Amino acid sequence: MARKSLIIGNWKMNLTHLEAIAVTQRLWYRLNPADFDRADVVIAPPFTCLRTIQTLIMADRMPFGLGAQHVHWEREGAFTGEVSAGMLAKLDVGYVIVGHSERRAMFGETDELARKRVRAVLSAGMTPVVCVGETLSERESGETEMVVTTQLRGALRRLTAEQRASVVVAYEPVWAIGTGRHALPDDAGGVCELLRNTVLAMGGPEAGEAVRILYGGSVNPGNIAAFIAKTHIDGALVGGASLDPDTFAAVVRYWM
Ligand code: PGA
């Protein structure tokens, strides 16, 4: 079964909703229908831009997917500052990033909280993008495989095989995020194969075959093709290079 490429732009805490309109429109002008045949292209802006971009892509029939960067696991209630999966689904959000290393490092995200978020996202009919990755010191002490499989197993606990097949996994070595220092494609391909085998062991061969696995960490127009050429890498989670429409369009059109 062929897995369609998936390229997600994670804008992080950048761009107002007005700036987001301009960036989305410029990205749209630079792409053509064949690009969307080859890859699913998703924009994950801050919460404050979601309604604006939803309206824009609906009005102009832009085939972008919409992503959110965070979610709370409860359906509603006294959780000041939080947003529920149901609220995101109502805005046509299709993907939600879970367990990003910035949230793990700065906001107390754990594997157990990631698991709760994964369940909430799936229950609302959206796709979780489960991020895993080792720090530099974990890598230097030879713990990469243990760290990423523990994170993934933690996030996918107590799900059905079908649910496990429907998630997206993003391998993002922490030392490669926002540093301009990307992983070697061979190394990243090897870790992504390990992650696929982990899903396979938890959810069976169909889940292992179906799950889309992305690489993230200083992806740019010059290195994306080498990552996607790897059998077990199905796309990319792109931070800095997704903020400029010219650069992000060049990432999306990686085969040209
Ligand atoms: P980067 O970020 O592309 O700026 O390294 C990737 C990410 O954090 O998802």
Image: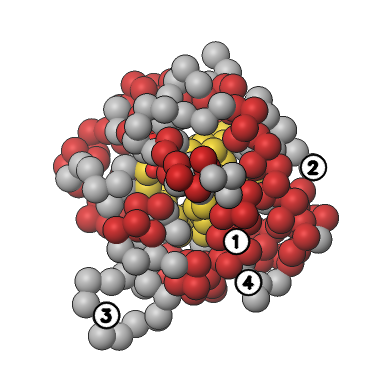
Q: How far apart in space, not on screen, are marks 1 and 3 (Cα)?
A: 28 Å
- Residue underneath mark 2: 1
Q: Is residue 70 left or right of residue 153?
A: left
- Quadrant in which ligand 1 is drawn: top left
Type of the residue with mark 1: Thr
Percent from the top left, x then y, of residue 198? Answer: 71, 56
From the image, which quarter does the N terminus lie in? top right
Type of the residue with mark 3: Phe
> Label 1's element?
helix
User: Which of the two labelled residues, at mark 1 and mark 3, occupies the earlier sequence position?
Assistant: 3
The residue carrying mark 3 has its beta carbon less than 8 Å from ligand 1 = no
Q: Is residue 80 above or below residue 108?
A: below
Circle on res. 150: 1
Nearer the observer, 202 or 70: 202
Residue in view at x 22 percent, y 43 percent? 14
Q: How far apart in space, not on screen, are marks 2 and 4 (Cα)?
A: 25 Å
- Category of crowding for the residue at label 1, using alpha-carbon neighbours closer than 10 angstroms: few (below 14), some (14–19), many (at least 20): some
Residue in view at x 71 percent, y 57 percent? 199
Residue 28 appears in the rendering: no
Asked whether the residues under the numbered discs 2 and 4 touch, taking CB atoms below 8 Å apart as contact, a structural biologist would say no
Identify the residue at the far front of this view.
141
Percent from the top left, x then y, of residue 19? Answer: 19, 38
Type of the residue with mark 2: Met
Q: How far apart in space, not on screen, are marks 1 and 4 (Cα)?
A: 11 Å
- Category of crowding for the residue at label 2, using alpha-carbon neighbours closer than 10 angstroms: few (below 14), some (14–19), many (at least 20): few
User: Which of the two labelled residues, at mark 2 and mark 1, occupies the earlier sequence position?
Assistant: 2
Nearer the observer, 196 or 173: 173
The residue carrying mark 4 has its beta carbon less than 8 Å from ligand 1 = no
- Residue underneath mark 3: 79
> Label 2's element?
loop
- Residue underneath mark 4: 157
